[in-house]
Amino acid sequence: MSEEPIADVAALFDLYQQGIVFHCVCAVTRLGIPDALDHEPREVARVAAETGCDEDALRRVLRLLAGHSLLTYDPERDLAGLTARSELLQGRHAMSLRATFATLGISDVAHALTETVRTGRPATVPALGTGFWEYLAERPEQQTVFSEAMAEQARLLSLPCVHLVDWPPAGTVVDVGGGIGVLLAAVLQEEPGARGILVDQPQVLDRARSFLKDEGVADRCAVRAGNLFEPPPPADMYLLSRVLHDWDDDGVVRILAAISRDADAAARLRIFEDLLPERGSPAPAQNWSDLVMMALYDGARERTLTQYRALLERGGWTFDRVVHGPPGMNVIEATRAG
Ligand SMILES: C[S@@+](CC[C@H](N)C(=O)[O-])C[C@H]1O[C@@H](n2cnc3c(N)ncnc32)[C@H](O)[C@@H]1O
């Protein structure tokens, strides 16, 4: 034990205080404050009135965030403004993280982690009273923000891998659990002769249709309501991007087996996922993601390549190769077994 624990006491207190910063960023983002602020600092009273906030409460939150360089706040003139960092919380920014901070997620269930660690079950049930997907399905507004958050993260994580692999020049690519279609649209833009089919839950598809239209690929991309546990339409290539880490091992095998059931013998599968190291400690971001999976979905986890290979085999696929992308993303390629 350290003889002079002052530095450790300070570090622990710092950590204790940091938690609230995350919640304040989520709160102001949900309230649309970054969108209401501009490059020119604005009076807090006006921003509060425009966004339907209590002026005093908003001022105190903005003042705290200014202390962490997330905003500017001038107490003499009562003016708040954005920094380069908080500009990224505006919906109109090309690399926006607005929905990532605004979505229902770990910030809403983390307080129930004690229960998760005791039971091994997700924190959603004690925190929200139900499973995560069920909760979203009953709340269309929350579902929309979550789908947007997945789109932001797909842009950041999956798109940098698109140019690392070849795509079928004239075939059909089915993206299973493809969200609003960020990855599939990029694939179709890369291969003008290819056609796409996006499969996801019915409540995601209206936004998917408008997104695919905006991306100029709607005429080559069908949109289908479907269940991960039932065979998707036939295709030359199937994509599963950041879907498998949401499920336990048996769920993953069921998803893989459902795809392989009606797939052509030559069909190929591409799985976009982060991969934990086979030995040693995962990176902090990987431990974070693994914990988020544990908190949100029953039995969900990040996995090593060895673990995915074993699951592929159980689900009727033969592992071919893995292409490593930038940190946080890899493309695992497989073909139908037998
Ligand atoms: C983590 S998101 C990934 C979305 C997208 N593939 C990406 O990379 O951003 C998981 C997706 O699985 C979909 N999903 C969850 N349960 C599903 C089910 N039972 N059937 C079909 N899709 C499902 C969700 O709606 C969501 O779009």
Image (spheres, rainbow, N blue to C red):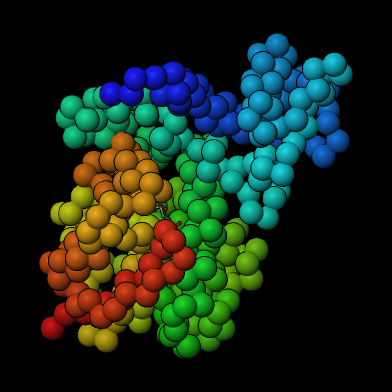
Q: In the image, what residue occupies the spot 24% across and 55% down?
A: 280
Does residue 104 show up? yes
Is there any visible trace of residue 144 in the rendered image?
no
Q: How many marks?
A: 0
Image height of 242 relative to 172, above or below: above
Left or right placement of residue 221 versus residue 109 in this view: right
Within the image, what quadrant is residue 224 found in? bottom left
Q: In the picture shown, does residue 27 fall above or below 77?
A: below
Residue 69 image point, x, y percent? 67, 33
Image location (x, y in percent) of residue 288: 37, 43
Horizontal and vertical percent position of residue 168? 43, 85
Which image quarter: residue 197? bottom left
Outermost residue toward the top in this view: 56
Report the side of 3 relative to 154 (left or right): left
Residue at 78% over, 32% down:
81
Nearer to the camera, 219 or 245: 245
Q: Residue at x 59, y 46 (%)?
A: 97
Residue that appears at 53% across and 62% down: 182
Q: Is residue 36 left or right of residue 9?
A: right
Image quadrant containing the C terminus: bottom left
Quarter occupied by the N terminus? top left
In the rendered image, residue 176, in percent from the top left (x then y), is placed at 36, 63
